[in-house]
Image: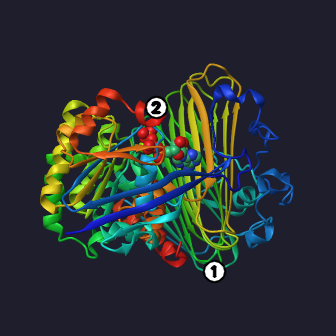
C-alpha cells in the first residue's frame, strides 16, 4: 500500500515577463488502487502539476511538499522519482531521433528495476502489451515517437506504463486526440496495468468520455492553480453539463 | 536546439528558396569562379584570410601545406571480390583526373606530388560488391596519395576507404559513378591523435546513377574533407552524409559541394556532429550551386551539431546559389546547440539517469548517419568509437 501526498504546493515558472506563479496551494492525496480525475479549464495548471510531480526543471516549487510513502519527492532528481515509482504519461511526448523504441524500453526497464530484464520473457511481455494496445510490432524498430501520430504517441505512453509498473501513474490528457476505438483500447490498457500492479492513478482530462472506461473514485475540479471542489464521479457529469463558469467567476 | 556558434544566422536557420531574396548565405566568391588547377603555384599560401581556410590555422596541417609532398609510404591493403581490378596508373590514363580538378592548395600539392594513382575498377556484377581499402599511415612525413574509384555502368557496390594510423596525408579521391550505377562510398577517418589529413573527394555521377557518400571523421588532430559532386547527365542522385565527433583540441572540417550543372538531378546533404571538450572545433560549409542549365533540380542540405560541453565550437555555414528559377526544390537547415531539455526530461522521467540519457541522445543522433553504412562490422566499430568518446566525457 503506497500513498502520494501533495501538500500546499506552490509552483512558479520563469517567463520573459518575470516569474509567474501557476500552482497556488494544491492539496491532494492518492493511495494505491485509487483513481483520481482532475478536470479544469485550459491553462489552470493541470500539466504544471503533472510536471511538478515528475520534476521537470522548468518548474520551481516555492512552497509545500510532495511525499511518496513519507519520502520527500522534491529532493529527488527526475530519474530518482521515476525509480521511486512515479510515472507521467505526457500530454506531448517528445521525439528522440536515432533511439529505437525497443532500445528505449529496455533501457528504461533496466533503469527502473535496477537490473536488465530476462531477455526471453521481456520480448514476450513487450509483444503482448503491444498486441493488447493494437500496436504493430514494427514500432519497436522505429525511433521513439518519431513520426508517430498523436494517437500512436499516447499508446506508446501507455505501453510504457504497462511495462514499467509504477506505484503512481499521472496521465496527462492521455485521452486527447484518440479516436473512439483507440480510447477504448488505451483505457483497457490502463485498467489492465492497474489491475496487475494496483497503482494509484491521477487522470487529467477534459472529457467524461474516458471516465466511462476508467472509473474515477474521486473527481477534483482544478481552477486557477488549485483544487476548487472535490467529489465523486457524479461531479464529472455535472461539470460536463454546466462547465466551469461557476468556479471561474467565484 | 539553441544557437551557440553559427556563422550563417542566429538560431535555427531553415528556409527554402523563396526566403533567399535577401541574399544571405551567398559566398563572397561564387563557387564557379574558384580557381581550379593541378598546379600548387596557382594557389596562394594558406592563411586564415583565405575564405577556404578561414577556420583552420596552417600549423595544424603538420606540413601538408608544402609545395611538394612525399608519396604515401604507409600500408595499403585491398579486399575485394573477384573481378575488381586494382592498379597504379599515371597522368595520361583516361581515369586520371576524370572526376575533378583540385580547388585548393593541399589538393593541388597532393595531385602533383603523387606520380601515380591507385585505381580501383569495379565492373558490373550480378550482386552487390563490397570493396575495402585500408590505408594505414606509418610515419609522420607529410605525404600525398591519389585514389580513383570507378564503378562501371550498372554496377552496385560499396567501397570503404579506411584511414588509420599515425601520419599526415593530403589526398585526392576521384569517384566515377557510371550510368545507372549505384555506389556507396564510405570514407572513415580514424587516425591516431597527432595526425593531419586533407582529402578532396571528387565525384562524377552518370545518367540515372546514384552515389551515397558517407564521411565518418572521428580520429585525428586535424581532418579536412572536401567532397564535391558533379553530374554528367540528367537523373543523377547524390546523397552526401557525414558524421563526426570532435574532442578536445580536435579540428574536424567538412565542406561538401554539389554542383548542379545539368537538369533533373537530385542532392541531399546531411551532416551531423557532436563536440566535447575545450577547443574541440568542427566546421561545416555546405555549398550548393544550381547553374542556369540545371532545371528541375531538387536539393536540400542540413547540418546539425550537438555541443556536449563548454569550450567547444561548431561553425556551420550553408550556401545556396541559384541561377535558374525552374527548380523542384532547394533548401537548407543548420543548427548548433546544446541538448534538448525536453528529450532529456523524457528519458529521465523513465528512470534513466542524466548521464545515460545524454549518451542515449548523442548515440541516437549520430547513429542516424552510421546506420546508413549498411556494413555491420564497420557500423559496430564506429559505434564503439563513439561510445569510447562518450565514456571519456562524462558528457
Ligand atoms: N514555461 C512557461 N512559460 C510561460 N507560461 C507558462 C509556462 N508553462 C506554463 N505556463 C502557463 O501556466 C499556465 C498553466 O499551464 P498548464 O500547461 O499547466 O495548463 P493546463 O491546465 O495543463 O492546460 P491545458 O488544459 O490547456 O492542457 C498557462 O497559463 C501557461 O501559459
Ligand atoms: Mg495541459
Can you say whether B383 is above or below A134 in the image? below
Q: How far apart in space, not on screen, are marks 2 and 1 (Cα)? A: 42 Å
- Check disc 1: other Cα within 10 Å, few if <14, some if 14-19, many if 20+: some
**Front-most of B379 and B291?**
B379
Determine the quadrant in which ligand 2 lies.
top left
Describe the element under mark 1 as helix, strand or loop: loop
Report the label total: 2
Q: Pointer 2: what residue?
A: B208
Q: Which mark is residue B139?
A: 1
Can you say whether B10 is above or below B135 in the image? above
**Front-most of A85 and A149?**
A85
Q: In the figure, is residue A207 to the left or right of B266?
A: left
In primary-sequence order, the first of circles 2 and 1 is 1
Q: In the figure, is residue A167 to the left or right of A17?
A: left
Residue B86 location (% of width, % of height): 47, 59
Is the CB of mark 1 within 8 Å of ligand 1?
no
Q: What residue sits 17% from the left and 55% below the top?
A: A193
Q: Residue furthest bottom?
A: B139
Q: Residue furthest front?
A: A250
Residue A194 location (% of width, % of height): 17, 56
Q: In the figure, is residue B381 to the left or right of B99?
A: left
Is the CB of mark 2 within 8 Å of ligand 1?
no
Can you say whether A72 is above or below B39 in the image? below
Q: Is residue B188 visible?
A: yes
Q: Quadrant of residue B90?
A: bottom right
Residue B381 location (% of width, % of height): 41, 69
**Front-most of A170 and A224?**
A224
Q: In the figure, is residue B32 to the left or right of B371?
A: right
Residue B188 location (% of width, % of height): 52, 63
Q: Is residue B160 visible?
A: no
Q: What residue sits 19% from the left and 33% below the top?
A: A181
Check the residue under mark 1 and report the chain it is in.
B
Amino acid at each position: 500500500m503506497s500513498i502520494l501526498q501533495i501538500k500546499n504546493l506552490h509552483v512558479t515558472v520563469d517567463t520573459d515577463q518575470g516569474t509567474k506563479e501557476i500552482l497556488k496551494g494544491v492539496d491532494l492525496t492518492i493511495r494505491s488502487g485509487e483513481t483520481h480525475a482532475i478536470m479544469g479549464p485550459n491553462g489552470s495548471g493541470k500539466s504544471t502539476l503533472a510536471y511538478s510531480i515528475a520534476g521537470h526543471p522548468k518548474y520551481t516549487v516555492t512552497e509545500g511538499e510532495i511525499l511518496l510513502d513519507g519520502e520527500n519527492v522534491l529532493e529527488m532528481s527526475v530519474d530518482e522519482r521515476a525509480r521511486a515509482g512515479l510515472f507521467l504519461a505526457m500530454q506531448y511526448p517528445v521525439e528522440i531521433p536515432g533511439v529505437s523504441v525497443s532500445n528505449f524500453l529496455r533501457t528504461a526497464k533496466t533503469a527502473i528495476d535496477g537490473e536488465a530484464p530476462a531477455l526471453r520473457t521481456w520480448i514476450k511481455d513487450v509483444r503482448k502489451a503491444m498486441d493488447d494496445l493494437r500496436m504493430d510490432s514494427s514500432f519497436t524498430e522505429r525511433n521513439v515517437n518519431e513520426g508517430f501520430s498523436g494517437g500512436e504517441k499516447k499508446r506508446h505512453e501507455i505501453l510504457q506504463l504497462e511495462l514499467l509498473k509504477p506505484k503512481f501513474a499521472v496521465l496527462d490528457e492521455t485521452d486527447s486526440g484518440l479516436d473512439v476505438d483507440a480510447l477504448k483500447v488505451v483505457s483497457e490498457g490502463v485498467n489492465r496495468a492497474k489491475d496487475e500492479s494496483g497503482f494509484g492513478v491521477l487522470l487529467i482530462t477534459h472529457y467524461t468520455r474516458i471516465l466511462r472506461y476508467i472509473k474515477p473514485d474521486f473527481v477534483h475540479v482544478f481552477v486557477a492553480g488549485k483544487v476548487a471542489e472535490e467529489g465523486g464521479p457524479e461531479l464529472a457529469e455535472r461539470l460536463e453539463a454546466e462547465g466551469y463558469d461557476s468556479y471561474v467567476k467565484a | 536546439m539553441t544557437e551557440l556558434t553559427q556563422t550563417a544566422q542566429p538560431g535555427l536557420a531553415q528556409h527554402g528558396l523563396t526566403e533567399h531574396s535577401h541574399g544571405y548565405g551567398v559566398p563572397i566568391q561564387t563557387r564557379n569562379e574558384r580557381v581550379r588547377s593541378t598546379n600548387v603555384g596557382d594557389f596562394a599560401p594558406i592563411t586564415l584570410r583565405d575564405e577556404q581556410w578561414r577556420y583552420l590555422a596552417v600549423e595544424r596541417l603538420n606540413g601538408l601545406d608544402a609545395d611538394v609532398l612525399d608519396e604515401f609510404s604507409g600500408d595499403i591493403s585491398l579486399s575485394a571480390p573477384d573481378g575488381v581490378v586494382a592498379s597504379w596508373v599515371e597522368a595520361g590514363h583516361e581515369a586520371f583526373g576524370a572526376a575533378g580538378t583540385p580547388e585548393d592548395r593541399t589538393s593541388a600539392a597532393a595531385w602533383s606530388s603523387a606520380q601515380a594513382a591507385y585505381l580501383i575498377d569495379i565492373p558490373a556484377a550480378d550482386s552487390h560488391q563490397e570493396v575495402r581499402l585500408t590505408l594505414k599511415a606509418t610515419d609522420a612525413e607529410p605525404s600525398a596519395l591519389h585514389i580513383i574509384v570507378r564503378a562501371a555502368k550498372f554496377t552496385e557496390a560499396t567501397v570503404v576507404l579506411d584511414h588509420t594510423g599515425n601520419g599526415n596525408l593530403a589526398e585526392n579521391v576521384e569517384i566515377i559513378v557510371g550510368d545507372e550505377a549505384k555506389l556507396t562510398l564510405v570514407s572513415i577517418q580514424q587516425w591516431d591523435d597527432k595526425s593531419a589529413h586533407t582529402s578532396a573527394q571528387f565525384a562524377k555521377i552518370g545518367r540515372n546513377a546514384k552515389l551515397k557518400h558517407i564521411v565518418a571523421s572521428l580520429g585525428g588532430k586535424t581532418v579536412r574533407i572536401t567532397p564535391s559532386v558533379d553530374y554528367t547527365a540528367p537523373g543523377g542522385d547524390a546523397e552526401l552524409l557525414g558524421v563526426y565527433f570532435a574532442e578536445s583540441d580536435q579540428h574536424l572540417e567538412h565542406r561538401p559541394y554539389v554542383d548542379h550543372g545539368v537538369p533533373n538531378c537530385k542532392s541531399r546533404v546531411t551532416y551531423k556532429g557532436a563536440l566535447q571538450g575545450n577547443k574541440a572545433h568542427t566546421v561545416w560549409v555546405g555549398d550548393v550551386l544550381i547553374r542556369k542549365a540545371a532545371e528541375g533540380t531538387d536539393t536540400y542540405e542540413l547540418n546539425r551539431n550537438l555541443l556536449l560541453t563548454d569550450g567547444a565550437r561548431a561553425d556551420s555555414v550553408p550556401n545556396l546559389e541559384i541561377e535558374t528559377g525552374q527548380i523542384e526544390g532547394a533548401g537548407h537547415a543548420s543548427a548548433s546547440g546544446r541538448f534538448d531539455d525536453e528529450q532529456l526530461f523524457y528519458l529521465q522521467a523513465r528512470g534513466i539517469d542524466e548521464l545515460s540519457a545524454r549518451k542515449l541522445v548523442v548515440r541516437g543522433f549520430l547513429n542516424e548517419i552510421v546506420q546508413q553504412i549498411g556494413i555491420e562490422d564497420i557500423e559496430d566499430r564506429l559505434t564503439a568509437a563513439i561510445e569510447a568518446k562518450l565514456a571519456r566525457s562524462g558528457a
